[in-house]
């Protein structure tokens, strides 16, 4: 019982004391996301606190440390790009997820649908993401179709068409990758449990829904974390279809002031912060939904290797 | 013998080229406890699975309570025929209580409070009321198997199938499962049990069936089969079993 309590939630309370590293991490995360949130609010509402893209504090305040002054000067513009990076990642993961469940289900349990799902998954995983984005953006007339939709590109809160194309592309792509992670997870649930579910009179679909999936989704979290990390980084490919996300902003600023190293380092720090946040959150999620008595997968692996 | 609960006629089942069941015939009256023994690979599990159609028979007729099972809705059939597995097969993400509740809610359509009450009762019946909120991985093998039995009982089955319910258990945990099964038999539950526990067969079985190579080679009251088997193969098998048990307990 005591063991169960210590597992749930990433408590920072270690034996009555606080783990200083975890406290520092939480403070840093709060600072970073608080600042980002304020930047986004500021820019969405046309300069709520300061002019769009301008730092909250003048960079000259930090003259004593040129690197910091540089970061303060350009971080606001990058922050606007981070919004699109985050948006593309979350949309890709979230919309790809239900499609992935259907694909993985078809892959494992389907007859003819198995081959349809397999075809889709292999087509998507076997071709470059950039090529997929180009086909959607230039090849299918998708961007001109979206451009004609009411509000797109004219109302400021609705992103322009390239962003929509990228969101569709990432959804299509992520669905295939998530489906593969999920398929592996479904196959790792002991088939005897589905048999037992059928043996009490549950239909196949209910057995999958109430017995297999709740476990498979837990087992899929590590793979799903990988997908999240990839998506954060690969969202930079949207730059090539003109989406002004983080990478795009860094390179366009650098093409004006030629400070490539500094700008890409700064952008790299943003990516790192996003990835750390993502892995931290999914690890907490994994702890929270861990099945009592069963070790987490990484714990099992650690035990085995000892 | 006019109105048997279960009747199996000329049941046949092949996997590929291999004919696993080669014409099985037997009947079960209500309250019967029939024990099925036989060497590994002789088709015992396949036979049980044909009864609840986890495996579809190739040929023959099985009737439950006068109804041809082949014509029944498979989920409806399985609701009426409970199954207890060698490997327990508990739902790993659910507590003991929820393992029992799932079928009540999703198959029988019980309300929340009815489900709660009934799950409690079944866990009580197998002596696990105090473990209702434990997860399978937190329970011993014997406790897991008793939850498995409670899960099957909750569906109010007419017939319970047991497929080697104690052979995955450590010897010291076998007794608690057998005693629950003994109580069910005393309560009048109709049970078809694959097991090699001679003690259980001797005490609880109305009939013992010896399955060999896809057919029922010999059948009769357990004492008769244990003491004066007709076939040499039955005798050899049972002698080996007796030696094994003596080795284990002695
Ligand atoms: N799903 C299956 N596919 C192919 N062969 C099977 C399957 N199930 C059982 N068999 C074969 O049928 C034979 C009998 O198996 P089983 O009924 O499990 O025997 P027992 O339970 O008596 O040990 C074995 O040879 C086994 O390999
Ligand atoms: Mg078997």
Image (tube, grey):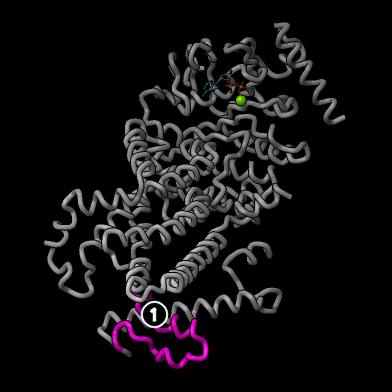
Exactly how many numbered labels are in the figure? 1
Query: Quarter holding the N terminus of chain A?
Result: bottom right
> Mostly what secondary structure, the magenta segment?
helix
Q: Is residue B240 left or right of residue A4?
A: right
Q: Position of residue A95 (x, y in %)?
A: 33, 56
Disc 1 crowd, CA 10 A, few/some/many (<14, 14-19, 20+) = many
Q: Is residue B134 left or right of residue A243?
A: right
Badge 1 is on which residue?
A74
Location of ligand 1 given as a quarter of the image: top right
Q: Quadrant of residue A69?
A: bottom left
Judged from the image, the secondary structure of the residue bearing numbered disc 1 is helix
**Is residue A233 among what the camera can see?**
yes
Residue A54 falls inside the magenta stretch = yes
Which sits in the foreground, B80 or A154? Answer: A154
Q: Is residue B40 left or right of residue A70?
A: right
As displayed, is residue A195 above or below residue A158?
above
Q: Which residue is at a point 20% across and 62% down the rendered structure image?
A: A161
Report the span colored magenta.
Answer: A51-80
**Is residue B152 among what the camera can see?**
no
Does the residue tagged 1 have its C-beta within 8 Å of any atom of ligand 1? no
Q: Which residue is at a point 53% across and 14% down the rendered structure image?
A: B21
Q: Quadrant of residue B181?
A: top right
As displayed, is residue A93 above or below residue B243?
below
- Disc 1 chain ID: A
Q: Which residue is at a point 73% across and 18% down the rendered structure image?
A: B223
Q: Hey, which residue is sitting farthest front in the picture?
A: A258
Residue B48 falls inside the magenta stretch = no
Which sits in the foreground, B49 or A109? Answer: A109
Which sits in the foreground, A233 or A30? Answer: A233
Q: Position of residue A126 (x, y in %)?
A: 38, 41
């Amino acid at each position: 019982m005591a063991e169960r309590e210590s597992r749930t939630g990433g408590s920072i309370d270690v034996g009555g004391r606080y783990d200083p590293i975890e406290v520092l991490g939480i403070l840093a995360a709060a600072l970073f996301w608080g600042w980002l949130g304020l930047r986004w609010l500021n820019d969405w509402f046309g300069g709520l606190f300061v002019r769009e893209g301008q730092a909250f504090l003048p960079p000259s305040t930090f003259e004593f440390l040129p690197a910091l002054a540089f970061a303060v000067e350009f971080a606001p513009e990058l922050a606007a790009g981070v919004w699109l990076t985050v948006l593309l990642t979350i949309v890709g993961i979230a919309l790809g997820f239900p499609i992935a469940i259907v694909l993985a289900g078809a892959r494992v349990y389907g007859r003819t649908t198995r081959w349809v799902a397999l075809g889709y998954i292999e087509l998507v995983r076997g071709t470059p993401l950039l090529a997929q984005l180009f086909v959607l953006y230039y090849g299918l007339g998708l961007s001109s179709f979206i451009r004609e939709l009411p509000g797109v590109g004219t109302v400021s809160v609705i992103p322009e068409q390239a962003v929509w194309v990228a969101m569709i592309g990432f959804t299509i792509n992520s669905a295939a990758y998530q489906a593969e992670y999920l398929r592996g997870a479904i196959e790792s649930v002991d088939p005897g449990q589905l048999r037992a579910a059928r043996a009490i009179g549950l239909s196949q679909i209910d057995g999958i829904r109430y017995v297999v999936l709740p476990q498979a989704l837990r087992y899929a979290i590590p793979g799903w974390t990988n997908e999240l990390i990839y998506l954060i980084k690969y969202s930079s490919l949207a730059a090539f279809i003109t989406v002004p996300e983080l990478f795009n902003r860094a390179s366009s600023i650098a093409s004006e002031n030629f400070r490539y190293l500094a700008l890409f380092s700064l952008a790299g720090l943003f990516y790192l912060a996003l990835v750390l946040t993502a892995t931290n959150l999914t690890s907490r999620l994994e702890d929270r939904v861990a099945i009592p008595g069963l070790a987490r997968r990484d714990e099992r692996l650690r035990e085995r290797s000892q | 013998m006019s109105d048997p609960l279960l009747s199996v006629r000329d049941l046949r089942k092949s996997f590929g080229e291999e004919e696993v069941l080669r014409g099985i015939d037997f009947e079960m009256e209500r309250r019967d406890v029939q024990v099925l023994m036989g060497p590994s690979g002789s088709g015992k599990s396949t036979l049980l699975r044909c009864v609840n159609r986890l495996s579809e028979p190739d040929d023959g007729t099985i009737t439950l309570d006068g109804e041809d099972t082949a014509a029944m809705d498979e989920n409806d059939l399985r609701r009426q025929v409970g199954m207890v597995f060698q490997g327990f097969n508990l739902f790993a993400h659910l507590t003991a209580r929820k393992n029992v509740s799932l079928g009540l809610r999703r198959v029988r359509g019980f309300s929340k409070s009815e489900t709660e009450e009934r799950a409690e009762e079944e866990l009580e019946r197998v002596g696990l009321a105090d473990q209702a909120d434990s997860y399978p991985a937190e329970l011993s093998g014997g406790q897991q198997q008793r939850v498995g039995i409670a899960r099957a009982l909750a569906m109010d089955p007419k017939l319970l199938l047991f497929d080697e319910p104690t052979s995955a258990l450590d010897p010291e945990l076998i007794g608690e499962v057998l005693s629950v099964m003994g109580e069910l038999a005393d309560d009048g539950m109709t049970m078809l049990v694959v097991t090699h526990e001679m003690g259980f067969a001797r005490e609880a079985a109305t009939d013992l069936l010896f399955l060999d190579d896809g057919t029922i080679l010999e059948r009769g009251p357990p004492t008769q089969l244990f003491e004066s088997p007709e076939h040499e193969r039955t005798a050899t098998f049972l002698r080996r079993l007796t030696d094994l048990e003596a080795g284990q307990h002695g």
